[in-house]
Amino acid sequence: MKAKNKNLKSLDQFIDEKIGKKGSEERELFENEYDVFKLGVLIQQAREKKD
């Protein structure tokens, strides 16, 4: 997928620049924490749906 604007970046490119490349310790920590966050959101949504 080519960007029409040269200043646009993919999410992976943005995270690579701000957090670190895949496989780096910082990136692994970020991705693990993001997975925990997603799980928390899913639990919250399930609880809200239950009521």
Image (tube, rainbow, N blue to C red):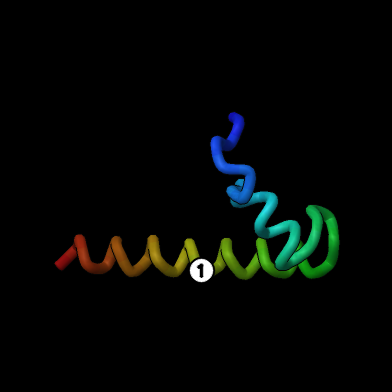
Question: Would residue 16 be found to the left or right of residue 5 on screen?
Answer: right
**What is the quadrant of the N terminus in the image?**
top right
Residue type marked 1:
Phe
Residue at 19% over, 63% down:
50
Question: Would residue 30 be found to the left or right of residue 1 on screen?
Answer: right
Q: Which residue is mark 1?
A: 37
Residue 14 lies in what quarter of the image? bottom right
- Assess disc 1: are there few (<14), some (14-19) or many (≥20) residues with their C-alpha within 10 Å of its C-alpha: few
Residue at 69% over, 51% down:
13
At mark 1, the secondary structure is helix
In x, y percent, where is residue 37?
51, 68
Q: What number of labels is visible?
A: 1
In x, y percent, where is residue 34?
58, 65
Residue at 55% over, 36% down:
4
In x, y percent, where is residue 45?
30, 63
Question: Would residue 30 be found to the left or right of residue 42 on screen?
Answer: right
31 or 20: nearer the eye?
Answer: 20
34 or 10: nearer the eye?
Answer: 10
32 or 20: nearer the eye?
Answer: 20
**What is the quadrant of the C terminus in the image?**
bottom left
Above-or-below relation of 32 to 1: below
Residue at 61% over, 46% down:
10
> For the view shown, which residue lies furthest in the top direction?
1
Above-or-below relation of 41 to 14: below
Residue 2 lies in what quarter of the image? top right
> For the view shown, which residue lies furthest in the right direction?
24
